[in-house]
Image (spheres, grey):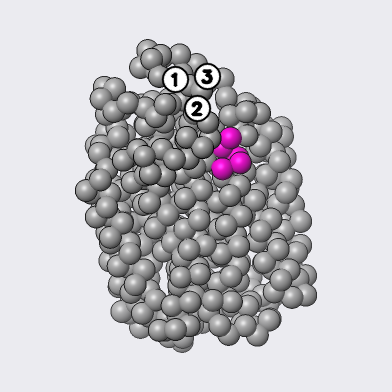
Amino acid sequence: MPIIAEHDFSLTAHSAILSFIAVFGISKACTNLIAGFSADLLGRKVVLVAGWIIVLPVPFLLMFAPSWGWILGANVLLGISQGLTWSTTVIMKIDLVGVKQRGLGMGLNEFAGYFAVSGSAFISGYVASIYGLRPAPFILGAGYAVIGLLLSIFTIRETRQYAAYESTLAQYQKTAQKTSLKDIFSRTSIGDRNLSSISQAGLVNNLNDGMAWGLFPLIYASAGIGLPKIGVLVAIYPALWGVFQLITGYLSDHLGRKFFIVWGMWIQAIALAITVSSADFLGFAFGASLLGIGTAMVYPVLLAAIGDVAHPALRSSTVGVYRFWRDIGYAVGAVLAGVMADIIGLYWAVWIVAGITCLSGLIALVRMGETLASSDTGKNKPIH
């Protein structure tokens, strides 16, 4: 998208180029709230199917968009679809795995998603280098949308009953289950030390993710890296992110959540500093690798920690609020990085985001407790 913005639509301001990430992040974040509440009210499967229906026109809008405004509109629809589909798959896996394997379940879910992102980044870069930026790379997206819809209709079964059963377990019997969305939003955002710490870490994680997706291809190109190698660099980050989540999610079920969250944020900050200090392919590849590992330490573990603390009857709505704050980070990162890049330059923008990421890890260290205990011993009371 950043290269299409420059090549096809002659956009030069970084804030304008990154606008597609901003509108995607805002629409996805707001839809997460709706998805979480709707999945509790209507069931998981209907929300999942609706999300896949909404995404069907997106690849074609991107293929044939006559102006940048059409690109932005397509990303709004993509954000709505992702808010419905990915939020629901997360909730369904938490429903299915139970209290002992949340980290592993989230690791599997995020591995599947981001390993696919990596593969698509690599393939689309290769296809674009041969057949051009449009429409060929987006034919893949049309195929994904059709397959996702068919799988959701014909192979996925409802999982809400598992959450209902879990809410009858002894540790949840004394906690009230009727809570308004406003109260859940307030507790998850500010009131609960664990939930609010998790939410801010998720926001900052996606802040640097949005910045990386928007600015890193431009940094690579400014260093003379060609389009095929840019595709490889863009693929490294989500590939390692995806694979290592299988390990970090599993380990967090046994070693606890807090260590992975704090150190994951700090490793991401170091990775950003390495990337902005590099000038060749090997340096960029090392920075992307470290960023993928740091993100893998955080991403599934944050979701597992939410599952530790939230009452099963309110889990979907709580996950929705967390994912609202996490995915608003895309928009914050894109706008902040774009404006800073226009004012003080690409490299200083990355340095500032690295500092914000380091601070986020410090906040989690000071404010957050270990949430794994809430599943095993009941020491931390679930949200109610």
Q: Which residue is mark 3?
A: 164
Cβ atoms at labels 3 and 2 below 8 Å apart: no
**Where is residue 227, by image quadrant?**
bottom right
- Residue 89, relative to residue 115: is it above or below? above
Separation of residues labelled 2 and 1 (CA atoms): 8 Å
Q: Which residue is mark 1?
A: 176
Mark 1 belongs to which amino acid?
Ala
Separation of residues labelled 3 and 2 (CA atoms): 15 Å
- Secondary element type, mark 3: helix
Position of residue 128 in the picture relative to residue 364 (left or right)? right
- Secondary element type, mark 1: loop
Q: Position of residue 366 (x, y in %)?
A: 22, 48
- Secondary element type, mark 2: loop
- Seen at 61% across and 55% down, the residue is 27
Dot in front, 3 or 1: 1
Q: Can the viewer see residue 142 in this picture? A: yes
